[in-house]
Image (cartoon, rainbow, N blue to C red):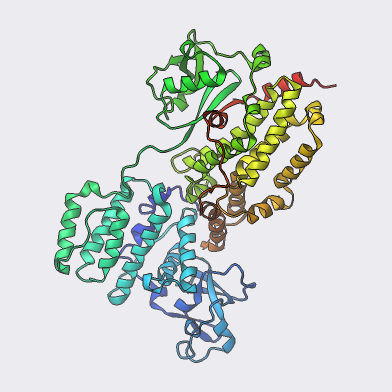
Amino acid sequence: MIGDTPPTNLSRALAFRLITYKVSWPALARKDYIKLDGCRLLQNHNYRLPDRNQAEPVGRVCLKERGRDVLVLQRVTSSVTSPSDRPSPTSSGGGSREEDCDKRYVVVSGTPLKILEHLLSDLRLDDQRGAPESRESEMLLDDFLLTYLVFISARCRGQEEGKDALFRKRKVLQLVSHWSRLYKDFLKEEEHVRSFMKTLYRCVLEDLYEFPTLEKDLKEFQKLLRRRHTVDDCPPNQKSKQMYQQLSLKENCLQLRGPQTETREVICCVYVSTDSYLSVHTHPSLEAHELLRIVALKMDKAEEDMVLAVVSHTGERRVLQPSDCVYSESLTPQGKLVACRRDLTEILPPLTDSAELSRRPVRLLGINTWDVAAALTHLDWSLFKSIHEQELVYYTLSRVPGSGHTAALSVLLQRCNEVQQWVMSEVLMCVSLNKRVQLLKKFIKIAAHCKAQRNLNSAFAIIMGLNTAAVSRLNQTWEKCPGKFKKLFSELELITDPSLNHKAYREAFKRMKPPKIPFMPLLLKDITFIHEGNKTFHDNLVNFEKLHMIADTVRMIRHCQSDQPGNEVIGVDSAEVRASVNYLHIIDNQQTLFELSHKLEPRA
């Protein structure tokens, strides 16, 4: 069962709303042991996240409630060797064999509620963190928060008191804090999330008098919410009242994040002929007159002779005013954006009939290849670093591409496709054989530089663009390409070899240190295979092993983003270089591409 709930709906979608303060420990939490092999194993010592490097586990045990399996554990060799971390003969009832002290039981599957209970029971508070067990429990927390969309469904019941209640409350706050930090700006300011956070905050305030030690956790929670008010030196019985009043008076000020300026990056497509468009990497507030200036610069046309129009699916054209915002969500369903002459005809005829191609300047030949590769890498990095791990999960679960939950990922995927199309278009729009050979050499070197700069997303796209049928069939062009470039291209092609599950690419990428940009389509393919190749539920129990695999793959993003590009990726930052990669003239019609290819080199 896959939920349709976005990550920001976690409170509304059962999980955190159901594990707030009033959630209880059912039978598993009250029973601190289970029986196995004639001995008793302490639950808190033997629930552990699997170590990927451990040997094959032996033996399974099922925990039942009311005659039904609710949790499946697997016995593995313990990675913790400290005697204090092992069950003692006393705590295990005196019947434990020595070899059982080196075993742990890890969660394989269970009901969502039992997994959530395990998560909270195994969670280490700040004063317990740093130990191997803490790292394991934090990894489990990460797995849960990254993949709860796949399975989340919970129920709660009961009540708990005293010290156990205090620990539960602190753990819930820590879990929510981890959730918010993990999602960062991806956590939207939706009303149900705001409502949940307010409710949780009030619960903490109400409990502050009974549990004064919550003060430290509350302060941390306040910082997380970016509130200006903190607990002062008032007695505990006054703290709750004062802070509750602050919350009531500032009801609308409780936000998950402060006001943000529009820093989102978008790709705006403006058609310049019936079979080609200009891809403009820009900001969402771009106005019509700014876009016309870019089109005029790129296409060598007079800006005053052009207008921008939105062409509907019925063919109707609506002219935009110079101050109109050209990147609008409302334009997409209406039609496409077109740069026209003032009589509303295209500024270029169909490229297969265009005599202008022979006069078209090949500006790329005059720009240093390292500078172009560095500009591609910096642009890709600006897109890649804004991707949140959760976007990959959303994209895999068949969410609508380009929606708010996958916006950054969709832009980078679009960019990857357009770089491939750009390479094809540049080669096939070059009428001169000698210049076409120079372009091949240029693109091969750019791909090699992108790989050296650890940008495999653009490297892949360029190599695939040169390998498409319309380009690879240009035998005269390839024959004139020097041998050393052909050899370099053959070496680059190895990383795109799909054999042995893309072994060459995976080994090359593994050797690269971060920051690095992976080939995103392949990463999404890996997650899709895990999702579709493994059942989410086994006998109505969540298959947590599947979730571990998904989370491990998704965390690749975090690893790749763990550092910033350094001085090794520096090129000349000129207007000409930026324009060469920010504004791409792309042929999006396959028939046009093949017609141009056959015009350049007719079939013998």
Please name whichever residue, 148 or 572, is drawn nearer the observer in this view of the structure: 572
The quadrant holding residue 414 is: top right
Residue 481's x, y, as percent?
78, 32
- Residue lying farthest top? 343
Please name whichever residue, 460 or 535, is drawn nearer the observer in this view of the structure: 460
- Residue lying farthest right? 604
Q: Residue at x 65, y 42 (%)?
A: 449
User: Quick check: can you spot residue 360?
Assistant: yes
Residue 405's x, y, as percent?
45, 43
515 sits to left or right of 24: right
User: Quick check: can you spot residue 313?
Assistant: no
Residue 88's x, y, as percent?
48, 88
Q: Residue at x 53, y 62 (%)?
A: 544
533 sits to left or right of 42: right
The quadrant holding residue 33 is: bottom left
173 sits to left or right of 355: left
Q: Residue at x 30, y 70 (%)?
A: 159
Q: What is the total number of numbered labels drawn onto the structure image?
A: 0
Up the image or down, 99 lies above or below 281; here it is below
Residue 528's x, y, as percent?
59, 49
Q: Residue at x 40, y 68 (%)?
A: 120
Up the image or down, 262 lies above or below 304; here it is below
Up the image or down, 229 lies above or below 575; here it is below
Q: Quadrant of the C terminus?
A: top right
